[in-house]
Image: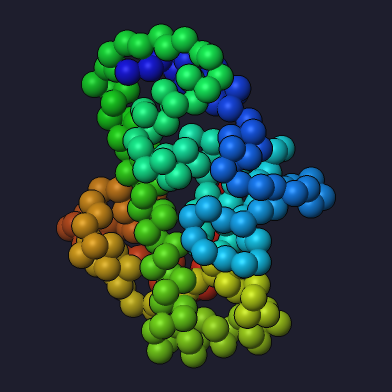
Amino acid sequence: MLDQSTIDKITDAALIQDVVSDYVTLRKRGVNMLGLCPFHNEKTPSFTVSPAKGIFKCFGCGKGGNSVHFIMEHEQITYYEALKYLAKKYHIEFQEREFSAEELAIRNDRESMFLVNEFAQKYFTSTLHNHLDGKSIGLGYFRERGFREDIIQKFQLGYSLDQRDAFSQGAIKAGYNREYLVKTGLTLENESGQLADRFGGRVMFPVHK
């Protein structure tokens, strides 16, 4: 495994605009850069690169992240393989070592919670547009407040049903571990082990970093 100092060297060297430009033609728009998303077919650019933040984000398909995430997604490889790919590109020597059990556990927790949050965004967005309550309550609220349809779609707004554990049970049925539902803060668990959705009955605004 790579030690943290090597990972830091790779991520510092792999400027997002340089990495993405190998695959996408980008043009400058203000402080950001814009291009056609390489992950889905589109005619109008919705793929944004932020050099200042070091991230990409597609407001069409929802994919986003840093340079490592871009290579993982584009090349369909693992996190470790993506780091090796970028190290080779930027001529950075690997300093490999074995991770401790504690370090592996922390890393696995972080990656698992990232996947849970990604599922949650898609779940709440789908609920907003496809569930009867989502359309009548959630979309009704957004429209009443003056949100345009393109804004609702662009920022992937959503709705959490006003039910005790609709999201939590949906995530578990989809194969997500209840431990990570609780760790993300999306789900609450009482002393008897019963789950409850933290944000039941609310419109949802995902935060894209």
Q: Residue at x 28, y 13 (%)?
A: 98
Q: Is residue 190 visible?
A: no
Q: Residue at x 63, y 80 (%)?
A: 149
Q: Residue at x 37, y 59 (%)?
A: 119
- Left or right: 72 in relation to 142: left
The furthest residue to the left? 192
- Left or right: 5 in relation to 79: right
Asked whether 168 or 100 is in front, the reply is: 100
Q: Position of residue 171 (x, y in %)?
A: 28, 62
Residue 197 sits above or below residue 30 on the image: below
Q: Position of residue 106 (x, y in %)?
A: 33, 30
The furthest residue to the right? 30
| Quadrant of the rendered image containing residue 127 | bottom left
Q: How is the image coloured?
A: rainbow
Asked whether 121 or 70 is in front, the reply is: 70
Q: Is residue 82 visible?
A: yes
| Quadrant of the rendered image containing residue 188 | bottom left
Q: Position of residue 70 (x, y in %)?
A: 50, 42
Residue 28 sits above or below residue 12 on the image: below
**Which quarter of the image is occupied by the N terminus?**
top left
- Left or right: 208 in relation to 76: right
Please tell me how many numbered marks the rendered image carries. 0
Q: Residue at x 39, y 84 (%)?
A: 131
Q: Position of residue 185 (x, y in %)?
A: 40, 52
| Quadrant of the rendered image containing residue 85 | top left
